[in-house]
Image (cartoon, rainbow, N blue to C red):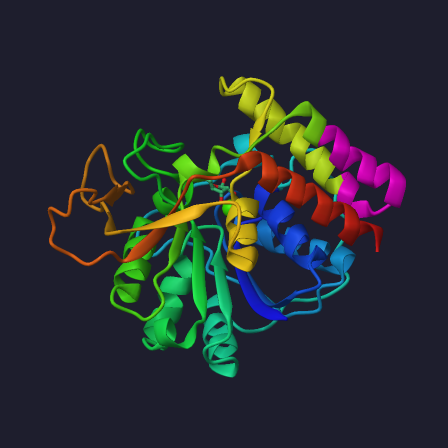
Amino acid sequence: TLPVLIDCDTGIDDAIALTYLACRSDVEIIGVVSTGGNVPVPAVHRNNLALADLLGISAPISLGAARPLVQEPMFADDTHGPQGLGHAVLPDPGRSEDPRSGAQLWVDTARAHPGELVGLVLGPHTNLALALEIEPELPRLLRRLHIMGGAINHRGNTGATSEWNFAVDPEAAQRVLAAFSGAPVRPVLGSLEATESVRFTQDTLDRVRQFGASTGHPVAMILTEALRFYFEFHRADGFGWTAHVHDPLVAAHAVTGQFAATRPLAVDVELAGTLTRGQSVGDELGRWGREPNVDVLRDVQPESFIEHLLATLGDGLAR
Ligand code: BDR
Ligand code: CA
């Protein structure tokens, strides 16, 4: 089985990614780090603890950093609801958190599985940036790193040009990309222009709801109620009756290598721009003279990905 650590700001699409990974028999979730982002870190953490109970995830779950490295925190409760999971009401978690910081959990988990751990960052990069201060060798300890973040030469979903996970903590994103430059593993970046091609429809929503009816699994009902809110947000934001489901595509590509191709690219994060702070800039024409430091997802196959996701959730939640 593939050992995976997930750092996430759960978050509706984070919850789907976590459920997807928990449903896969070839994946072992060996660490979860809660990071502030979509909602404040205590709410993210409560969601992760409660979902872990319901999904049978026994891995340590750490309360990550409450604040970005430099700027003030910001939250997206309009997108994910005040508690982070839309209309869903979660039971109180029956377990407590791991006492270690999110950064320390990254470091300890990577050191315990040198060359094996697949790291997934599905929220702001604060904890991983702090982990790199504790263990600068971290890029050489991981098997792979997969990131949902950025919008490469594409409009943003937060600022005019910035994507949420990079916009919340631009310094952290910049430090992570810099630390992995030249490392043996090149991070895989699922940026907005790739992840936004995954659009759930009413049919997708109905099928998730049916898993709840047929299996009685509480997580199917939680995801249905969360997604209903996510659809309402997207409609209010002018996208129609749909939902952009970002994080699960990155999770599925990380563990299967399928549903998208990749292309190497030099990418950096704008920190100084008064209009463009947090923007991920891709050097398409090699003007910087730098080696590529990430593999960017491209040519996404959204239909086959959504079928795969639903099949995995259907099987996993029926077990
Ligand atoms: C990212 O921002 C969050 O709201 C989502 O969970 C995803 O990780 C998309 O920009
Ligand atoms: Ca997220």
User: Magenta stretch?
Assistant: 205-221
Give the camera-side residue of 30 and 73.
30
Residue at horizontal 32 percent and vertical 71 percent from the top: 184
Viewed as shown, does residue 110 lie left or right of 71? right
Q: Position of residue 289 (x, y in %)?
A: 11, 54
Viewed as shown, does residue 132 lie left or right of 245? left
Give the camera-side residue of 45 and 212.
212
Q: Is any part of residue 123 visible from this angle?
A: yes
Viewed as shown, does residue 195 lie left or right of 71? right
State the image quarter where residue 283 is shown.
Answer: top left
Q: Is residue 208 magenta?
A: yes
Residue at horizontal 58 percent and vertical 47 percent from the top: 14
**Quadrant containing the C terminus in the rendered view:** bottom right
Q: Magenta residues: mostly which secondary structure? A: helix
Q: Is any part of residue 7 visible from this angle?
A: no
State the image quarter where residue 55 is shown.
Answer: bottom right
Q: Position of residue 109 (x, y in %)?
A: 52, 76
Q: Is residue 37 magenta?
A: no
Give the camera-side residue of 2 and 44.
2
